[in-house]
Amino acid sequence: MDENLLPERITLRQPDDWHVHLRDGDVLKTVVPYTARTFRRAIVMPNLSPPITSLRSAIEYRDRILTAVPMGIEFTPLMTVYLTDNISSKILEEGKNSGVFAAAKLYPANSTTNSGMGVTNVKAIYPLFETMERIGLPLLIHGEVTDLDVDIFDREAVFIDKILQPLLKKFPSLRVVLEHITTEQAVDFVGTNRCNLAATITPHHLHINRNAMFLGGLRSDFYCLPVAKRERHRLALRRAAVSGKPCFFIGTDSAPHLRNAKETSCGCAGIFNSPNALESYAEVFHQEGALQRLEAFVSEYGPSFYGLPLNTNSITLVRETHFIPQSCQLDSDKQSAESLVPFHAGEPLSWRVLRD
Ligand SMILES: [Zn+2]
């Protein structure tokens, strides 16, 4: 590609983030501004401890998020409810009718961070999907089986065969998002399926393969779930992202964990990418010669799938190599030396969001 033919700046309709972890407490105060400065809306994951399982807890969490949004910035958190073995259809209806729940999230029990209260048997909550299908509440899925006898690198593909296929067959009108896909099996399955099935793709799964976790030692900053896979899967994800197919759209899965929770004998899964998420996607689309399709991926396909209006304001990216800081200090009242390590720490990116 001739670099000289590239524009110096690109202006996009403001994007949304269709999958983010904003956490709580001091971490929430630190990370919300990063998301809110770039994205107009975000689908907020409910896996707090304890998780968001009621209308009241979702409203209270939304209030805590809004308190952390910097002055003068418009940002709408779209709340999700955490499905458990025992949650009632009534709660889902109540949350949807009140306009608070934008979607419900299915975590197979023990599949990832704070999923201990997740669903132990997906078939047993089929009555909930019946309700969701009827009231139009989308189902967001962490698509991995949790059987310890299934290899960790195969858990997404096995989930598609054993859990997702029968579920889609049983509920043909249910809108489903297979979140943060990591395999070519997921790309093929979603890309050739019905129009009410979509997938989000994270920036990190477009940039790294599983070798990143072992480069010169054990690199916890690149450990996330679903875990990064082989190179051929990364390439399939890149093709999907730039394909112009509306069933593939942005969802950063930015998932901050404090340094000491990453660097320990049992480090947490999650990559914190919100400070530079849009730039990170732009890098991929640039490398793939597909910058003209970035806007649809980050700003159009998501709202269309969710049945929400497109944003009307815009954001500008300038072509300017800049280095990502090694860490972000926590915004804390206490004298805390805690930090978060952002994705691409210490690396250059070629596009930068223009801030006023
Ligand atoms: Zn997530």
Image (cartoon, rainbow, N blue to C red):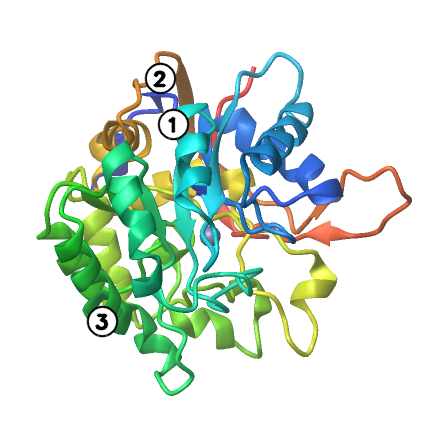
Which numbered disc flags the more N-terminal residue, 1 or 2?
1
Q: Secondary structure at mark 2?
A: loop
Q: Secondary structure at mark 3?
A: helix
Answer left or right for 113 relative to 280: right
Residue nearest the viewer, comparing 59 with 249:
59
For mark 3, what is the residue? 162
**Residue at the extreme bottom:** 149
Which numbered disc flags the more N-terminal residue, 2 or 3?
3
Report if residue 158 is visible in the image: yes
Residue 280 drawn at (x, y percent): 42, 43
- Other-residue count near label 1 (Cα within 10 Å), few / some / many at <14 / 14–19 / ≥20: many
Q: Where's the N terminus, which quadrant?
A: top left
Query: Residue at 32% across / 46% down in the picture?
Result: 139
- Other-residue count near label 2 (Cα within 10 Å), few / some / many at <14 / 14–19 / ≥20: some
For mark 1, what is the residue? 15
Which numbered disc flags the more N-terminal residue, 3 or 1?
1
Instruction: Answer yes or no: disc 1 within 8 Å of ligand 1.
Output: no
Q: Is residue 343 above or below residue 69?
A: below
- Other-residue count near label 3 (Cα within 10 Å), few / some / many at <14 / 14–19 / ≥20: few
User: Label 2 sits on what residue type?
Assistant: Asn
Residue 338 drawn at (x, y percent): 79, 52
Residue 98 drawn at (x, y percent): 45, 23
Q: CA distance from mark 3 to mark 1?
A: 34 Å
Residue 311, disc? 2
Pair 2/3: label in front: 3
